[in-house]
Amino acid sequence: SGRSRQARAPYARLHAFGYVLDQMKAADWVEASLPVFPGVDAERHAYLADAAARLTDGGGIAAAALMSAVERALFQRPEDVTGDRSRVKTELWEATATHFYEGVRRVAMTDAPAAAVDEVCRAFATTLERTAVALFDRYCFSGTADPSTIRRLVAARYSLVMTLRGYSKLGAKLFAALRIPSPDGSRQARAKRSRTRKEAST
């Protein structure tokens, strides 16, 4: 049962911390907390590694898509981009960290880890879309923008949403990283089946 599984796989956390040094001077304080499941067997560890890799890869692609969308919205030309906007990607990681760890924990605790990995990845895709779009709206507020800027914001936001839903090359890459069915791939498959039926009837 789920309760017996929880007893066999206790949930703990490993907390690591330290300074970032710049020319031997403390520049920043860095810390991270990671889940540890000491009671799981080798097979379940493989599922945990698979889930973590899929969620990490998907999150990285979504973060890159978000930062690109923000830059396209705020700047008219790529060569006009100034400043370090890596904070946009960091905020997406931070905002989705709880969902990430809870997803991995679910895989560790369930009696059906294979199915859980797929369900966790599908749920994480929804989380990435919701969180990334919210961050885009915060960074690219259009309340006082001129018409040309608003058009650019709308186009960038639309492109981001379509990517996060799998309807672009980068979106297909995102869904492939999470290993969940791509809506764009399903549409292409339906179109291919339709063409095949038409060719067979001629």
Image: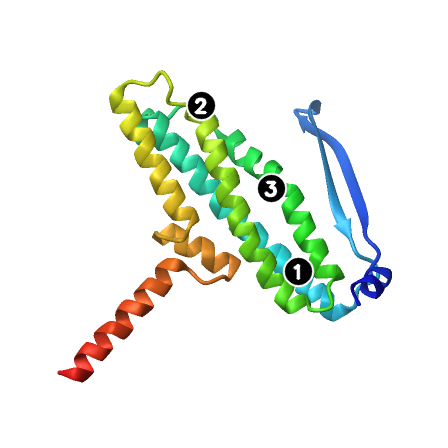
Residue under the image location 52 percent in, 36 percent down? 89
Can you tell which of label 1 and label 2 is closer to the viewer?
A: 1
Q: CA distance from mark 1 to mark 2?
A: 35 Å
Q: Position of residue 142 (x, y in %)?
A: 37, 22
Residue 4: which quarter of the image?
bottom right
* Residue 30 appears anywhere in the view: yes
Q: What kind of residue is marked 1?
A: Ala
Q: Which quadrant holds the N terminus?
A: bottom right
- Which numbered disc covers residue 83? 2
- Which numbered disc covers residue 96? 3
Q: Secondary structure at mark 1?
A: helix
Image position of 125 (left or right of 7) = left
Can you tell which of label 3 and label 2 is closer to the viewer?
A: 3
- Which numbered disc covers residue 49? 1
Image position of 197 (left or right of 94) = left
Q: What kind of residue is marked 3?
A: Thr
Residue under the image location 58 percent in, 50 percent down? 56
Tell which circle, 1 or 2, labels the residue nearer the N-terminal end: 1
